[in-house]
Amino acid sequence: MKRYDLIVVGAGPAGLSATIEAAKYGLKTVVFDENSRPGGQLFKQVHKFFGAKEHKAKIRGFKIGEQLLADAEKAGVEVHLNATVSGLFDCKEITVIENEAMHHYKADAIILATGARENMIPFEGWTKPGVIGAGAAQTMMNLHGVQPGSRVLMVGSGNVGLVVSFQLLQAGIEVAAIVDAAPRVGGYGVHAAKVARCGVPFYLSHTVIKAEGDDRVTGAVVAEVDSHFKPIPGTEMHLDVDTICMAVGLSPMSQLLSMAGCKMQDKGGIVPIVNEYRETSIKGIFAAGDVGGIEEASSAMITGKITALAAAYELGFAEEKEFREGETCYKASLAQLHEGMFSPANKGRTDLTVTDEGVLLSQNLLKKGYLDLGEIMRFPGAADEVKKVHGIHPVIECTQNIPCNPCQDACKFGCIAVGADITRLPIVNPANKCTGCGMCVASCSGQAIFLVNDDFSETEASVTLPYEFLPYPEPGTKGMALGRDGKAVCEAEVVSCRLSPAMDHTALLTIKVPKEMSMTARFFKAVGV
Amino acid sequence: MAMYLDRDDDLGGFHPEPDDDLIICRCEEVTKGEIRRAVYEGMRTMTEVRRFLRVGMGLCQGGTCGKLVKGIIAKELGVKPAELEECTSRSPARPIEMRVFANEVSDDE
Amino acid sequence: MRIENHPILGTFHEGGQMVTFTLDGKEMQGYEGEPIAAALRAAGVMTHRHTLKRDEPRGVFCAIGRCTDCVMIVDGKPNIRTCITPLKAGMKVQTQYGIKAKE
């Protein structure tokens, strides 16, 4: 039986981060992953991450995955792919199914980073081909380059549902609607707004009740639900779709921990009871990432580091000083991600009405997925508009406290500030020094920054918006400008569509519209599209 | 949280519901009605329902239906899902062919 | 349908090799190494198997090898998860009925 100092189960963001950290302290480490590719769900994420620079903000998920893999390779980590850990025992021995054989391994510490699986809700016809998990849609589109369908109903408005809906649009697939049984959008407002302005309607307090079709999905029926989430008869609505995507939450895959005898609890999923270092009730067995509780990749990377550091210290590879310094640093980093409107402390709260700054939250954003014009003017990001600043200036439609600050670093002229508390809403520097370079527009992971020039011409204003679709419209292309709700509001013409490597595939689309539409026009559709 | 287990509770008679024909365990094709009926026939734990109906014993080993089955049993018993004891997790965690299972390799250092 | 050009990811299967395989005897094409299920989806195939008890069609559900709804008979072996099994030239893929192919 092969012996190691540390065994890591799962080579996703938590597992890889743990191994890279362990390598720093010289632990003899091995990672096992049952998939043929490492990286967990990271390689399916094409959107830019939130947070601060240390959390890899502004970087696309799959690029973070590539970075982690390169770091792991540099650290000389031993990775076994297509290796399924089939047993974990309290003596810290594991059995692995690899190359058609059963192998045994033993270690002094084990970090379990097996992630989570998708939840499901059953409804009439849910077993028909065409009903898939949102993760399945991502896998097909982003890993294999295949469209899962041509017109989709998304069930669930949490971050997964919102982000995958946008990815479906990017893959050339129509999204007929996003439904959620809850009365409010579950994910970030900016993720919802990105999708709403493309014309995707939100039906909150609605759920899917039937998948139609013989041997595959050819349609769906949704209905409004009451306060007990029961469908209300008479409210049924038919949608023409060939795919139904389920994004109704995740559950930790913690069976190996229960198997070993760790004390578990049901906290929205079966999770191990852990201490501040994510160590379970069995000394030397740790849980990192989503298996310990559903969060995100950013937190997974930090808990991976914390568990590896704790293991290194416990086994005598890290000195007290190194351990305390590392522990303080990582915990602070994690704490930053745990703040704001969507923090674990606020989970399930429906009574939030104002931001930390005291500005009334947009109820439209929560109920329909887009901001109302009147609501935007309340927020610090619209200050230049309120003051009717001349010339080009940013309009930041960021209206919820989320730990995120790439916009601040994006502007070389100091036009945007977030401050030390990265959950604060961005404010615009009153001394308008905007040059219209558009770096802020491209750097905002929520695609919530626009450049507006009300003085473009005598009768026209220009609006520069982030654009991540193909084909890029040519200058002179005529079409319609869409409002935040995705409805056509006026005629528009493309002035330019700029792309530079620094913008990492977020093109800057500048359109000209009638002057009075500068604060309404937020998306563009070419004529004949 | 204390785990629920009361074999003397009176659940009344089984009453059919309109969605009893809904498939819950996709692998073994077990319906909601069959799971509900099992509770009325005296099954009180996840493990008992599983052994009676084979929910969670198919190829996916309860990955898709586990949480749903727990919710249905809990609703019939009038308790919170968190009060029901989970099925025991045993090795092998994934389905494995017998010839592979028996092919134990000793990796000597 | 395959995605020709993705705004973030660009093109797929650069330098990839198209190979032939059969589905229930019918000749199909796909990229060597991509999951069998991807090649089938690209060709518009939705049904991978029929269930044992109710003879109902099933297809890709989770796409990551967890749910086992996409299993088919590949080169004579049943219960092969097509969403994670790489396509090889000349593979014989059959729709699985219960746990067997249709005679």
Image: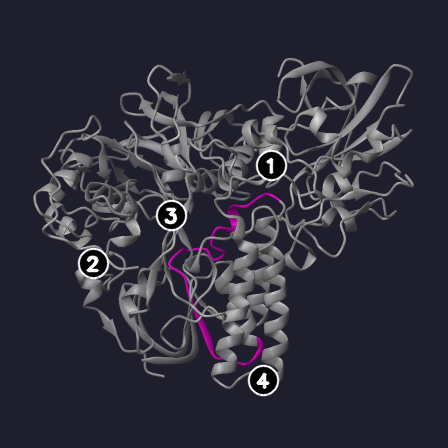
In the image, are marks 4 and 3 on the same chain?
Answer: no
Judge by depth and name the residue closer to the eye, B107 or A510.
A510
> Mark 4 = which residue?
A320
Magenta highlight range: A24-47
* Secondary structure beneath label 3: loop
In the image, are marks 2 and 3 on the same chain?
Answer: no
Quarter location, residue A72: bottom right
Identity, as a three-letter code, of the amino acid under mark 4: Glu
Residue A309 is left or right of residue A228, and the answer is right
From mark 4 to mark 3, how far is it between C-alphas? Answer: 48 Å
Q: Are marks 1 and 3 in contact (CB under 8 Å)?
A: no
Q: Is residue A347 above or below residue A166?
A: below
From mark 1 to mark 3, how far is it between C-alphas? Answer: 39 Å
Residue C64 is left or right of residue A371, and the answer is left
Quarter location, residue A525: top right
Is residue A443 something one can see in this rendering? yes
> Mark 1 = which residue?
A189
Is residue C19 something one can see in this rendering? no
> Mark 3 = which residue?
C86
